[in-house]
Image (cartoon, rainbow, N blue to C red):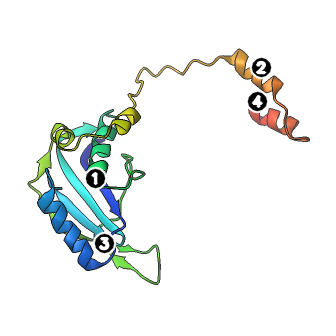
Amino acid sequence: IELRAYYVDVDGISGEEYKQHKVFEVLCESKLPPSAVVVSKNGLHLYWYTSDPVPSDDSFYVGVEMGLIHAFNGCKRTKDIARVLRLPGFLHMKDHSDPYLVYVAHEDKKKYYTASQLMKAYPAPVEAKREVKVKDHSNKPPETDWEKVVQAFADWTPVEGEKHKTRMKFLGV
């Protein structure tokens, strides 16, 4: 699996006229304008198509995402690689009494960026860079100090009547 685009979920934009203004603003004032802009009920989804597909476990993915999120004031919780945002052509039905048709406001299928271009234009803030974790691909299980685990369990004082049940769970029974 390879990454095909970076994205930002920009929430808190209501009213069609204001959404259209924000789309225009994003496209005209960005260092590297997004390849696509999708309008959802509560805001915009901005996409930057990538010309150098990135492996899904790549460690700098979070750094690129955080740079984009910071630059466009996006949702900091919506950055995981497996995220599926609302799809254009479908109704946003969180409130069944007020459905909203999600649509593509802009797409330039010729606009592709490298991760390096995006990182240079939108560097991640310092605190976001600390979040980037390099995965250990050695497939070695983490070291566990079992003596400490057993001692902690022996020293533990459970809720009255729950000690036996908890020990059975601990032992996998």
* Amino acid type of the residue tagged 4 in the rendering: Leu
* Amino acid type of the residue tagged 1 in the rendering: Tyr
Taking 129 as reference, is 21 left or right?
Answer: left
Q: Residue furthest bottom?
A: 97
Tell me residue 169's x, y (percent): 76, 36
- Quadrant of the image occupied by residue 35: bottom left
Please, is residue 169 above or below residue 30 in the view? above
In the rendered structure, which disc, 2 or 1, sits on the residue that comes first in sequence? 1
- Residue on which the image places disc 1: 7
- Residue on which the image places disc 4: 171
In the rendered structure, which disc, 4 or 2, sits on the residue that comes first in sequence? 2
In the rendered structure, which disc, 1 or 3, sits on the residue that comes first in sequence? 1
In the rendered structure, which disc, 4 or 3, sits on the residue that comes first in sequence? 3
Nearer to me, 34 or 55: 34
Nearer to me, 44 or 173: 44
Cα separation, mark 2 vs mark 3, equals 56 Å
Q: Secondary structure at mark 3?
A: loop
Cα separation, mark 4 vs mark 2, equals 15 Å
Q: Which numbered dot is residue 60?
A: none
* Amino acid type of the residue tagged 3 in the rendering: Val
Q: Residues within 10 Å of mark 1 (few under 14, many from 20)?
A: many
Please tell me how many numbered marks the rendered image carries: 4
Give the quadrant of the N terminus.
top left
Taking 112 as reference, is 135 left or right?
Answer: right
* Amino acid type of the residue tagged 2 in the rendering: Gln
Taking 45 as reference, is 171 left or right?
Answer: right
- Of tags 4 and 3, which is closer to the observer? 3
